[in-house]
Image (cartoon, rainbow, N blue to C red):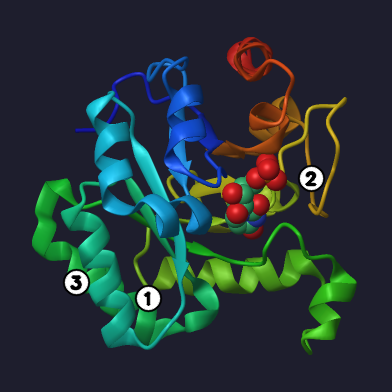
Amino acid sequence: MQNPNDPKIIVALDFPSQDPALALVDQLDPAKCRLKVGKELFTRSGPQLVKALQGRGFDVFLDLKFHDIPNTTSSAVAAAADLGVWMVNVHASGGEKMMVACRERLEQFGADKPLLIAVTVLTSMSGDDLAGIGITDSPELHVSRLATLTKNCGLDGVVCSAQEAPRLKAEQGAGFQLITPGIRPLTAEKGDQQRIMTPTDALKAGSDYLVIGRPITKAADPLAALEAIHAEVQGV
Ligand SMILES: O=c1ccn([C@@H]2O[C@H](COP(=O)(O)O)[C@@H](O)[C@H]2O)c(=O)[nH]1
C-alpha cells in the first residue's frame, strides 16, 4: 500500500554498505521521505536491505536502471515487484519493445505492482555529453522524445531533470510522473550533476518527486539538512 502521506522527497541512500545506510535511516521519518536504493548499496546488501527498509515503514524506489533485452529486463522488474518495492526503473533508450514487455510483465501483480518509470537523459549529462554519444539535439528535446515514447509504452513516468519538467507536464499531462534527481539547495555543491534545480523551484516547475542524495547524506548533520529541505518545500 502506498504511503498515505505521499512524501515528495526521496533520499538516495548512496552508501557503501548497510551499516551507514541504516544509521541514517534510523533517524528518518517515513512520513517525511521515501528511500532510494541504487546500484552500489543493492550490489553490497541486496534484497535483505530492501526488506529492512520496508520493515521500518519506508517506501523503496529500487533505482537499478535496467537496460537490457526485453526478456531479461521484464524478468528483472518482476523480481523487483516480488520484493514489494514502490518504484522501479528501466532506461527509456532500451526502446519500445523492452518497455512494453516490462509493463506487461508487471500486470500480473495487479494493484501491488510497483510504479514503472524510465530514465530519459541522466542529469549528469549536458548537451556536450549528449553530442559525445552522437545525439546532437538538446537535452530538453531528447528528454521530450524519450518521455513521449515512455508514455506511449504505458509506463507511469520518467526520470528527468526538473529543468525539463514544465515542458514534460505540458506535453504528457499532469498524471505522468516526473522523478527528478539533480536537486541542489542553493548552498549545496553541484558535484557531477549538470542539469540541477533547487527543491522549491523543482516542485514549482512540476516535479512530482525530488531525489536527493549528497546534499543530505554528506551534510555535517544529515537529519538537519533533510528537515531544512522538508520545511522549505512544505509551502510549495
Ligand atoms: O538521471 C539521473 C538518474 C539517477 N540519478 C540518481 O539520483 C541520485 C542523485 O544523488 P545526488 O547525490 O543528489 O546527486 C543518485 O543516486 C543517482 O544515481 C541521478 O542523479 N540522475
Front position in the image: 187 or 210 = 187
Query: Looking at the picture, how far across and down is residue 3, in whole percent?
Result: 30, 26
Q: Secondary structure at mark 3?
A: helix
Q: Which mark is residue 86?
A: none
- Three-letter amino acid code at the position of disc 2: Ile
Label 2, secondary structure: give it: loop
Q: Horizontal and vertical percent for residue 103? A: 27, 69
Instruction: Quadrant for the N terminus, please.
Output: top left
Q: Which mark is residue 105?
A: 3
**Residue 43: percent from left, percent from top:** 43, 60
* Residue at the (80%, 77%) spot, across then down: 130
Q: Is residue 100 above or below residue 216?
A: below
Q: Which residue is mark 2?
A: 196
Give me the C-alpha separation between circle 2 and circle 1. Answer: 27 Å
Provide the residue designation for mark 1.
99
Task: Tell me which amino acid carries mark 3.
Answer: Arg
* Earlier sequence position, callout 2 versus callout 1: 1
**In x, y percent, where is residue 215?**
72, 31
Q: Is the CB–ligand 1 distance for label 3 below 8 Å?
A: no
